[in-house]
Image: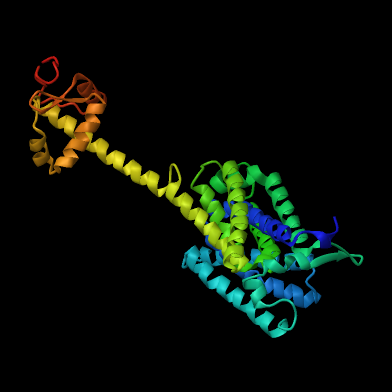
Amino acid sequence: MNAGTLDPTLVILLVASCVAASCALVGSFLVLRGMALLGDAISHAVLPGIAVAFLWSGSREPVTMLLGAAALGVMTVFLVELGTRTRRLQEDASIGVVFPALFSIGVILIARYAGQVDLDLDCVLYGEIAYTPWDLLEWNGQPIGPRALVLNGGVLALVASFLGLLYKELKLSTFDPALAAALGFSPVVLHYALMTMVSITVVGAFESVGAILVVAMLVVPPATAYLLTERLGHMLILSVVFGVASAWLGYALARWLDASIAGSMAVAAGGLFTLVFAMAPTHGLVAKALNRRRLRLGMAEQLLMLHLEQEGVARDPASIGRRFGWATERVAQVATRARRRGWVTRDAAGGLLLTAEGLGAIERSGQASLRHPPSPAAGGLPTG
């Protein structure tokens, strides 16, 4: 198919998907290493590398830009760690010193020396993915495809190859650097190799989506996936799925609102994170709230059973409420839960009694009282 005949909407979605996937893959390791903020720093600090590469080469040739950005990305990591090693600065403070300084240098260089060409601050910060279908890459005077699609597709292939080759080593150095070093793998080399890939990924997406969406895709999809799984392989897959879904949903949102495409994609990523943060089956807010409720009811149930075991006779719900400061509804709720389990029953007068199954549950938990053995009235239990 001729490059010029590609559907513009398809090109936009493919570019966004490539950016989202590559950012999600490297971003997963940043999130797991507790270095998400460093990814933000690199995404801004590579700007002077892009500017210097452009001024040195006089063109926006992709390889030169990637090399310049990668060099500044590694330099950013080195400067941050240099500040941290002084033990006078925490990592977040060191990042806060390094990346604004480098980013400002890049802004000055672009504004001063590249203000009249197609490399400006709006391009770097916000990007405009809507223009990518018409910015074609040529070879021998013939268009071979949209520049952003070719570049970001190549970056995605490079990132996937890098992770495929060093998956076990990166996994080991991420979770146990000491063991990785003992087995002969250099955590430092792997760390800088990963940061180089982050830099390449960032600059590959700069022109098409801008720094703001790059930061969102580096952090939000991996953080969303992290809430759903505890396996690295599953996290990588889910990160890519959430990143691509954010791109497609964001594009639909931008069309609906007639708004910024990159901004809408970042909003979609945030929306998916919020949904998972609330509804995740294990770590979601709803699941945790339900677990806390079950825990409180379970503790209240145990307290009720211990009280009945110590008393050894039927107890009126009202007296139980006064004893523990529970409202009538609370007593009824706890008693109903215990009765469903067969641990508590009611006598003819409506009092609560501990059953044999209830006493067995207490003994299994190791909390049975030795001071007040239950009477035969408590469900026909033996006296001793």
Work out whether 341 lies above or below 7.
Answer: above
In front here: 154 or 49? 154
Side of 349 where 293 appears, left or right = right
Q: Position of residue 209 (x, y in %)?
A: 65, 66
In front here: 383 or 296? 296
Q: Quadrant of the N terminus?
A: bottom right
Q: Position of residue 120 (x, y in %)?
A: 68, 78
Work out whether 355 lies above or below 251.
Answer: above
The reply to whether residue 146 is in sight is yes
Q: Position of residue 22 (x, y in %)?
A: 66, 54
- Residue drawn at (60%, 74%) of the image: 103
Work out whether 220 lies above or below 48.
Answer: above
The reply to whether residue 366 is in sight is no
Q: How many marks?
A: 0
- Residue drawn at (58%, 51%) of the image: 242
Residue 194, image quadrant: bottom right
- Residue drawn at (63%, 53%) of the image: 244
Work out whether 324 lies above or below 14.
Answer: above
In front here: 312 or 6? 6
Side of 271 where 313 appears, left or right = left
Q: Quadrant of the C terminus?
A: top left
Q: Position of residue 247 (x, y in %)?
A: 62, 57
Q: Going by the picture, which residue comes out furthest to the front? A: 256
Q: How is the image coloured?
A: rainbow
